[in-house]
Amino acid sequence: MAKPKTYYSCRQCGYQSSSWLGRCPECGQWNTFDEEVVAPVSTAGRSPRHSTAQDSLPKLLHEVSSSETQRIPTQCAEFDRVLGGGIVPGSLLLIGGEPGIGKSTLLLQTALQLKDMRVLYVSGEESEQQIKMRADRLMDPSAPEPMACNSSLFVVSETSTQRIFEHIEAVKPEMLIVDSIQTVSTDRAQSSAGSVTQIRECAAEFQHYAKESGVPVLLVGHITKDGTLAGPKVMEHIVDAVLQFEGDKNYGYRILRAQKNRFGSTAEIGIFEMLEGGLRQVANPSQFLLSQRDKTLSGAAVAATLEGIRPMFVEVQSLVSSAVYGTPQRNANGFDLRRMNMLLAVLEKRCGFKLGAKDVFLNIAGGMKVSDPATHLAVASSILSSNVDIAIDPTVCFAAELGLSGELRPVRNPMQRVAEADRLGFERIFVSAYDARLLNKKRYHLEVIGVSVIEEVFRKLFA
Ligand code: TYD
Ligand code: MG
């Protein structure tokens, strides 16, 4: 019998070495090497080599049937949208997110909604009773929209993949959910659950099962503090799609985003709201985010951003006040601080404001995080508005990037932003002069204002 192999691998990036190292030469992290022992494949129950030579013969491209595989709709439009129109049979999906963000809730909810489909929900984190309690909460008939009840949903609390495959033999599910990949372990690797080798080996076993049986497998994965999926990058190569579930835990909304998707676009996002009775879809995020506005005060400006390909209107708020202490304070929530400092420098130079001696605080309402450069103009306008203490008309919104010399630059998909602004009832939108020339202004009710430099915006807003 072949001897088990021993090597050391980095917990962060999966780098492998035959000896222990203090610092990973790949990712530069200290003290991340774990000893890994892997039993040779021949002694393991499941061999990864399964296809016969006949299956794998090269085919001419035009002979390959292009019939669209029947996707499984999840009964949740937002989830389907991110998946690219439903779950593809035999696919392996990874749903990542911080602890407590709602991954288990989303998957249990999905399993409950799939009426009459045999679903096996394996949890390595919760007992069957805990899952039942959660399901009862989701199906609470007194809730405004109680969930459906899938009468073919099986649940089991289990962490060994060998035992999980025995349960699969018994239940013969049409869909498998594993919560989470960090808690399951295989006998083939001797390290503890959650280590690089365990995650990789378990993911490979589930992939093998999914491809062989055509049953879709949904894996939950935790993410580390720095926001990357815990475990080696190699897991991201094994799975067909990586969906990231994110949001601020202090606010109700959650965004599901595809980081990788072999069966759909990564530009789509799904938006949910966490309520007492589970996650609810938010079909119209802009209305949801702007609904909290009552009366506009100085320092508020609406940015027409795009999340992937979905227009999303967010309110930018800022507060500019004289610095009480020596060094002025700068703080940004939901917006890159360095970028805010850059915009402040541009405003200082071009609009002649002495912002150097002011405290500047910036916040994106609703706990949203924005990185779209089209928010620059709204950020700059909101800072100017707070600085002069004059409110911006609430029927105005902005979509332009601000360059270092104070010039306004075109944005991605201006048409879509203007159309959405029109639909939401805005009366004016500020865009770059370049975008304004491209737009067919007759198509919209709202007035499209093209501006080429930031001074012009300032004059138009506050003169
Ligand atoms: P959970 O799905 O357990 O998160 P994860 O699996 O990503 O760790 O959800 C965690 C939070 O969601 C929990 O703190 C409570 C909240 N929650 C609700 O607000 N409403 C609900 O109906 C449910 C089931 C959970
Ligand atoms: Mg969970």
Image: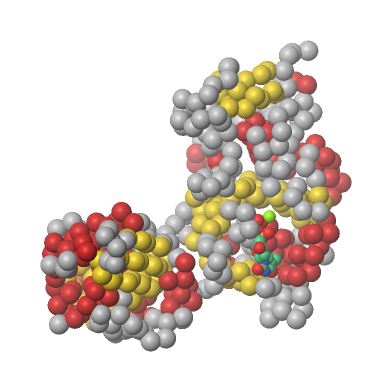
- Residue 155 falls in which quadrant of the image? bottom right
Quick check: can you spot residue 154? no
Q: Position of residue 29 (x, y in %)?
A: 49, 32
Q: Quadrant of the C terminus?
A: bottom left
Q: Position of residue 141 (x, y in %)?
A: 77, 79
Numbered-mark total: 0
Image height check: is 144 above or below 304?
A: below
Say which residue appears at 56% left-offset and 45% top-offset.
224
Residue 112 vertical placement versus 168 (above, below): below
At x 49% / y 27%, what residue is drawn? Answer: 24
Residue 399: quadrant of the picture: bottom left
Position of residue 219 in the picture relative to residue 313 (left or right):
right
Q: Position of residue 456 (x, y in %)?
A: 14, 73
Q: Residue at x 33, y 82 (%)?
A: 297
Q: Which quadrant holds the N terminus?
A: top right
Instruction: State whether residue 342 appears in this view.
Output: yes
